[in-house]
Image: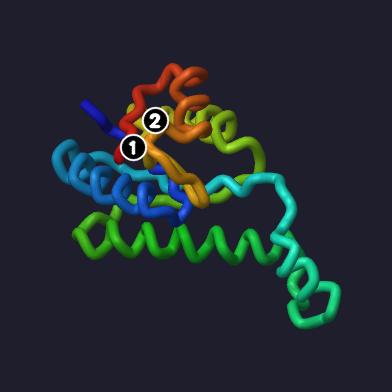
Amino acid sequence: MFKKILVAVDGSSHSKRAIDAAIDLTKRYQASVLLLHVIRDFSLPKELLEMISAGEVTASRREILENSAEIILGDAREKFQEAGLSDISSDFLMGDPAATIDDYAEQNGVDLIVIGYRGLGTHGKMLGSMARKLTNITAVSCLIVR
């Protein structure tokens, strides 16, 4: 049923549960996995900007966000590999998360998008804005994991 599964990861607890669900589905359907992290185009926290200004942090904003993306993707890839799965690719892109995930899924022939119910820094019981937006714009089936 599912041959290619896209797992959008951001390092949040919901994202980590989405990875676990995707591992189960990947094994069940012998699917390939695409891991994607989308870097939002927003500014760094004030404290980090102050550290950059003071010379305490020498990496650029983009370098910091790309390094973070690599860590998040590496952690996700490791979980899949620990589960005995090897048909995994990963990528990070910059842009609006929902639109970028949708475009990436369509360009790569994805059968299922797996995402967490809420992302980083979000609280409460309502569906996160990115998950809500993605399900409204995509033609690809989505699994939203709590």
Picture quadrant of residue 143: top left
Q: Is residue 144 above or below residue 65?
A: above
Residue 66 horizontal/vertical position (percent):
62, 60
Residue picked out by circle 1: 5
Quadrant into which the N terminus falls: top left
Q: Is residue 97 left or right of residue 45?
A: left
Residue 12 horizontal/vertical position (percent):
43, 53
Residue 2 horizontal/vertical position (percent):
25, 30
Residue 91 horizontal/vertical position (percent):
52, 50
Query: Residue 108: which numbered mark, if any?
Result: none
**Amino acid type indicated by mark 1:** Ile
Which SS class for mark 2?
loop
Picture quadrant of residue 111: top left
The residue positioned 23% from the left and 64% from the top of the image is: 82
Residue picked out by circle 2: 110
Q: Is residue 22 left or right of residue 135?
A: left
**Amino acid type indicated by mark 2:** Val
Quadrant into which the C terminus falls: top left
